[in-house]
Amino acid sequence: MSYVSLLKESVEFKLLFSQSEHLLQGLHSSKQKGDGIEFFDLREYCAGDDPRRIDWKVTARLQEPFVREFQEDRDAVHHVFLDCSASVKNKLLPMQVLAASSLLSSYKQADALSLTLFSGSLFPSSTAKGKKHLSALLYRLSQHVPSGKADLCGLFFFILSTFKKRCIITLISDEMEFDEEALSLLAQIARRHKVIFFHVYNSSEKELSFGQQALEDSESGEELLFDLSDEQVMKYQILYDSALRTVREQMKRIGVRLFQIDAARSLQACLKGVRTL
């Protein structure tokens, strides 16, 4: 996708974001002047949280325990991490637009920004403010070609070792399976930072037909021949839906704000019914 096309798509999508208060709520901290620690956001209670931070009014209203989060810094820093492994090829455009929209929204808030593209390797940018830096990130975003296999544990180790001060972490990925090590690392990140996860999937991937058909491995590019029965197709569809549900449950458990986006639909349509966890 060209830089100009990406920018146009993202500006239009940013306008949609600004009209979706529930989607942006809590994304940015308050920039009001004042001394002391500032209120940052509300999130669901996780095991190990300080009970003194429970917001009892919100807890009573929603019938689930919520805790208050605070930060000392008035200027937010926003780091966006985009999965560029080979498996995202049929989801690339909406993922690019989500990344660009996140950057544009934070730029509007005068936040410092960075963009890291990841697959088997990490391709981080510098962290800075300003229109020139934003333009460089958007151009870089528009030029990258997906390849390789995502190394989530490597990414999470990088985040934990690099970012010591509290910041906003936006993760955009199509990963369908998080092993225990990856989940443990992500939980550590969520305790230290504000984490937003755009989980992008493509529902057309589960629309298989019975009989012989050639399927391409999304990460290796290898074409494999399968002879599928009705029962196997149905089992695969059930497993696919179960994987999506498991991701929702995992992110809720570790306190990560999740948005699941179907790349087979328009982003506008997805956002109309999007749920946060």
Image: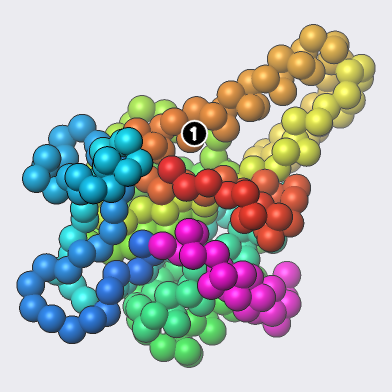
**Magenta span of residues:** 1-25
- At which x and y percent is residue 255? 33, 42
Quadrant where the image shows the C terminus: top left
Q: Is residue 266 magenta?
A: no
Q: How is the image coloured?
A: rainbow
| SS assignment at label 1 | helix
What's the residue type where badge 1 is placed? Answer: Val
Q: Is residue 44 above or below residue 135?
A: above
- At which x and y percent is residue 262? 67, 46
Q: Is residue 7 magenta?
A: yes
Looking at the rendered structure, the number of numbered marks drawn on it comes to 1
Q: Is residue 51 visible?
A: yes
Residue 125 located left or right of residue 217: left
Q: Is residue 154 visible?
A: no
Name the quadrant containing residue 252. Answer: top left
Q: Is residue 130 above or below residue 36?
A: below
Q: Main secondary structure of the magenta part?
A: helix
- At which x and y percent is residue 269? 71, 55
Residue at x 76%, y 16% (from the top left corner):
234
Which residue has dot 1 on it? Answer: 247
